Amino acid sequence: MDTILTSSGLAVCYQGASYKTVAAALRRLDPVLLLDQQLDEWGRPVWCVKIRHGADPREWRPIVWWTDPDDTPRELSLGLVDQVRAQELTRREQIVSGTSLADSTRRVRERLADEARQEREDLIREHEKRLSPGHGKPVTFSTSLKTKGR
């Protein structure tokens, strides 16, 4: 029996299952999923789930390793299927629909346009302050400096 502690703190117990049972459950979840066993970095056999992608099996990368948090290999059970299902739900929630993506892009463009407009207005105000006299008469360039000094 395999006990797993979920992120919410709930302990879930799984009874061991055969390769055939787990592989069939994975195929029902998605036909491209493949149950495999590989050696980890210490040479221990670890169950993993791969996605069949392309013709070369060497290119099929594992998406789930069936290990404890300390990387100890777990006994094969249907908990592996639940783990894959949980990851799939997370991925689906992260996928953005085309409509919401377009809305998000529109909002970003509007925000950037507002920021650019505000920067232009700030620059204009700053230059107006610099060009306006702080006191006395406004400076005009209608009179030549040479004639005024002589």
Image (cartoon, rainbow, N blue to C red):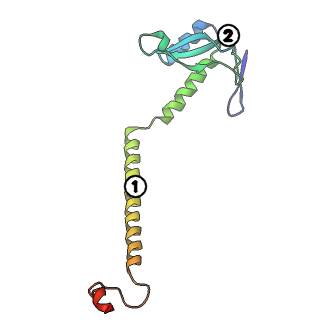
Secondary element under disc 1, as helix, strand or loop, is: helix
Mark 1 belongs to which amino acid?
Leu
Q: Are marks 2 and 1 in contact (CB under 8 Å)?
A: no
Place of residue 78 in the rendered image (x, y in percent of width and height, measured from the top left): 62, 16
Q: Earlier in the sequence, mark 2 or mark 1?
A: 2
How many numbered callouts? 2
Question: What whole-number distance in Å separates the C-alpha atoms at marks 2 and 1?
Answer: 54 Å
Q: Nearer the viewer, residue 49 or 5?
A: 49
Q: Check residue 134 in the rendering and tell me which mark sits there, or answer none.
A: none
Circle 1 is placed at which residue position? Answer: 112
Place of residue 79 in the rendered image (x, y in percent of width and height, measured from the top left): 64, 19
**Quadrant that contains the N terminus:** top right
Q: Is residue 117 left or right of residue 73?
A: left
Place of residue 133 in the rendered image (x, y in percent of width and height, measured from the top left): 40, 84
Q: Is residue 89 left or right of residue 9?
A: left
Q: Nearer the viewer, residue 11 or 74?
A: 74
Which quadrant holds residue 120? bottom left
Secondary element under disc 2, as helix, strand or loop, is: loop
Mark 2 is surrounded, within 10 Å at the Cα level, by few (under 14), some (14 to 19) or many (20 or more) other residues, namely few
Circle 2 is placed at which residue position? Answer: 43
User: At 62% from the left edge and 13% from the top edge, which residue is drawn?
Assistant: 47
Q: Nearer the viewer, residue 145 or 63?
A: 145
31 versus 116 height, above or below = above
**Quadrant that contains the C terminus:** bottom left
